[in-house]
Structure formats: structure tokens, C-alpha cells
């Protein structure tokens, strides 16, 4: 069997991830599975560790991120240029959108069981996005990226002491609601110049643009309900010309993916996107703040091998009418 590595963020979910790992470790020992565990010591360390594991030899290795979406984002950014890594995820963070989108159980121990089963099968190839910022620095995303209101909320959440409190009360997801309400009345919408596969669109009074590789973001909101991670296309969502009060209704409807029916929500598909704005907007990739607009985004088709229960586009097409929803 391939060598198995875990990169663990002991600080994810405000330290609860370390306890999660202790439970996973005793399970691995009971099952006599050999592995190597590496712990992150600072922000950005998971990327470095993933790069070091990948570069060590050309042998195929399985690399599992244990933490939140931020940890998965860093691990993926560390291994993305290498072909010898199969990527997996065990949710140990507060948001865990990767596990929703790629059908990995939210319970970490169940997730480990699923990962162990998936390790015996062929991994799935999925698309990823590459963002080029105006200073030519690149960031990859596996779930989604966004510019504007949603990015400023992600930024506030990740830099807030309230996150620890919400996590302690097991209300991790509600912190997004708290900051949404806090920012709703002061946020200034802007004009966005969006180019999708060469076609230009100008949106005035825009709240945000998201570019998705899978349906879920910001702790379980179904922002791009029809998004598939292996179809060679991003799902792009623009929310514009919306009163502050109506934004609240749209927000509530995002959890069920019904927001796309509002006339102020525009959706597109495409693989080459650029975002220019009249003033710099906050930008996130997989919920992590990465800088400001302008930027361009390229899709790399089937560029990363992942352990997922989500059926591939081809399998879904074969089983015509088959549901691919998580259950
Ligand atoms: N040892 C560490 N000390 C402090 N910060 C760390 C450490 N390791 C990783 N980080 C940072 O912790 C941040 C949050 O991690 P992560 O997103 O995995 O957990 P989370 O915030 O609990 O979950 P989610 O993003 O799903 O809500 C990331 O920005 C990462 O860079």
C-alpha cells in the first residue's frame, strides 16, 4: 500500500482538532495501519509540509489534511505541482465545506473509515482553480474563491476572537451570520468588470462574485448548487443591485441553494475568469484571505487526485437521473 501521511492543524476549531486527532490515532493503531503524522506550527506551515512530503521521492503517497478548509487549502497548495500525491481530508475545523462538497462524513472518525475504504480504490481526478493576483503571485483553490462582501466576512471571521467563543458553544457556523449582520449596513457595493471566457460583463452595485468548484462555501451555504468538480467549468455567481434587506432573504435562501432564482443573482459557467473593480476588493480562496482585486482565474482540468465519495460526472451521466446529493 502507498505511504500514508497526515498533516494536522492542532489549532483548527480552536484547538479541538488536536483531540480529534488523538481519537483518530488510536483508531489507526487499533487497525495496525502505519502512517506518519506531522503537525503544523504556524499559518502556512501545512503548505510547506505538503511540498516537502511530495518532493521527497516520486513514489505515490496519500496525504490527508486534518483540520478545516484553511488546512486543506494550504496542503493542496503545497502538493498541487506534483503528480505523486493523492489528497484526502478529515474534517477537524469549524466550517469543513470540502467534506460537504466531496461527500466525506462530517464526523472525523466516520471520515477516517471512509478514507481507509477509499484508499483501496482508484482516486478521482478533480479540477482546481489558479488565481493570479496583480503582483503575479499565484494561489490555488479547491472549493471556491470570492471577491467583495463574502471575502470581507471570511476575513473578519478568521481574525475575530468571537470565533473561539462560537466554536466553544458549538455554533461555529453562526459566526458567519453574526458578521454578515455586522457588515450588512456599512458595506459599500462596487462596480465589477467581469470577463468569462473572453465575454465581458459589467455589474454595478455588486455585493460579491464567487467562483466555485463545488457547491458549498462559508460553512455549508450552497452557493453553487449545480457545481461539479470534474466538469472543466467553474460556476460563477454574482449578487448585485440588491437592497440590504433583500440581501438577508437571499442569504437565508443560499442554505438551500434557492438564491439562484432571485433576479439579482446571476450565474455563469466558464473556465477563464478575470475580475476588475473600481476600488480594490477583499479576496478569499477557500475562505482564506489572499489579497485584493484585480485578478485572473484559470481552471486546471482534472489536475488533482482526491479521495472522495462523490461520483464523477461520467458516472452520474451513466446513471441518468441518479442523484449525487450527500446522504
Ligand atoms: N499551528 C498553527 N498555529 C496557528 N495557526 C495555524 C497553525 N496551523 C495552521 N494555522 C492556521 O489556522 C487557520 C485556520 O485553519 P482551518 O481553516 O484549518 O481551521 P478552522 O478555521 O477551524 O476551520 P474552517 O476554515 O473550516 O472554518 C489557517 O489560516 C491556518 O493557516
Image (cartoon, rainbow, N blue to C red):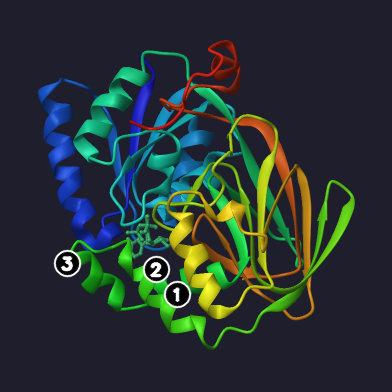
Instruction: Identify residue for label 1.
Output: 180
Task: Give the class, few, some or many, for how many residues have Cα within 10 Å of label 2's Cα (few <14, many ≥20).
Answer: some
Do the numbered discs 1 and 3 sit on residues whose CB atoms are within 8 Å? no
Instruction: Identify residue for label 2.
Output: 176
Q: Nearer the viewer, mark 1 or mark 3?
A: 1
Return the residue nearer the eye: 23 or 29: 23
Instruction: Identify residue for label 3.
Output: 169
Q: Mark 2: which secondary structure?
A: helix
Say whether disc 1 or disc 3 marks the residue closer to the N-terminus: 3
State left or right for residue 306 relative to residue 89: right
Q: Mark 1: which secondary structure?
A: helix
Say whether disc 2 or disc 3 marks the residue closer to the N-terminus: 3
Count of residue discs:
3
State left or right for residue 95 relative to residue 197: left
Task: Give the class, few, some or many, for how many residues have Cα within 10 Å of label 3's Cα (few <14, many ≥20).
Answer: few
Decide if residue 159 is in sight here.
no
- Image position, residue 17 (x, y; %): 23, 52
Q: Is 103 drawn above or below residue 312 in the view shown? A: below
- Image position, residue 66 (x, y; %): 32, 44
Do the numbered discs 2 and 1 sit on residues whose CB atoms are within 8 Å? yes
Amino acid at each position: 500500500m502507498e505511504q500514508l501521511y497526515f498533516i494536522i492543524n492542532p489549532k483548527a476549531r480552536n484547538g479541538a482538532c488536536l483531540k480529534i486527532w488523538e481519537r483518530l490515532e488510536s483508531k489507526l493503531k487499533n487497525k495496525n495501519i502505519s502512517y506518519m503524522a506531522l503537525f503544523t506550527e504556524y499559518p502556512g506551515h501545512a503548505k510547506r509540509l505538503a511540498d516537502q512530503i511530495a518532493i521527497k521521492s516520486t513514489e505515490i503517497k496519500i496525504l490527508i489534511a486534518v483540520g478545516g478548509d484553511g488546512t486543506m487549502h494550504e496542503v493542496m497548495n503545497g502538493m498541487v505541482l506534483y503528480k505523486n500525491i493523492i489528497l484526502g481530508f478529515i474534517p477537524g475545523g469549524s466550517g469543513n465545506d470540502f467534506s460537504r462538497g466531496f461527500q466525506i462524513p462530517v464526523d472525523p472518525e466516520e471520515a477516517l473509515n471512509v478514507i481507509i475504504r477509499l484508499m483501496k480504490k482508484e482516486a478521482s481526478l478533480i479540477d482546481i482553480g489558479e488565481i493570479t493576483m496583480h503582483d503575479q503571485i499565484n494561489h490555488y483553490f479547491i472549493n471556491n474563491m470570492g471577491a467583495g462582501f463574502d471575502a470581507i466576512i471570511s476575513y473578519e471571521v478568521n481574525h475575530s476572537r468571537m470565533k473561539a467563543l462560537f466554536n466553544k458553544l458549538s455554533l461555529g457556523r453562526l459566526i458567519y451570520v453574526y458578521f454578515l449582520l455586522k457588515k450588512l449596513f456599512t458595506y459599500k457595493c462596487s462596480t465589477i468588470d467581469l470577463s468569462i471566457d473572453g465575454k465581458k460583463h459589467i455589474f454595478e452595485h455588486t455585493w460579491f462574485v464567487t467562483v466555485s468548484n463545488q457547491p458549498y462555501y462559508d460553512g455549508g451555504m450552497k452557493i453553487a448548487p449545480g457545481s461539479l468538480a470534474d466538469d472543466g467549468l467553474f460556476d460563477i455567481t454574482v449578487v448585485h443591485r440588491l437592497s440590504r434587506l433583500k440581501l438577508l432573504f437571499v442569504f437565508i435562501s443560499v442554505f438551500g441553494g434557492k438564491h439562484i432564482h432571485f433576479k439579482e443573482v446571476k450565474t455563469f459557467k466558464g473556465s477563464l475568469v478575470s475580475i476588475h473593480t473600481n476600488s480594490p476588493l477583499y479576496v478569499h480562496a477557500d475562505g482564506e484571505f489572499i489579497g485584493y482585486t484585480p485578478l485572473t482565474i484559470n481552471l486546471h482540468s482534472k489536475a488533482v487526485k482526491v479521495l472522495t465519495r462523490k461520483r464523477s460526472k461520467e458516472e452520474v451521466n451513466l446513471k441518468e437521473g441518479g442523484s449525487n446529493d450527500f446522504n
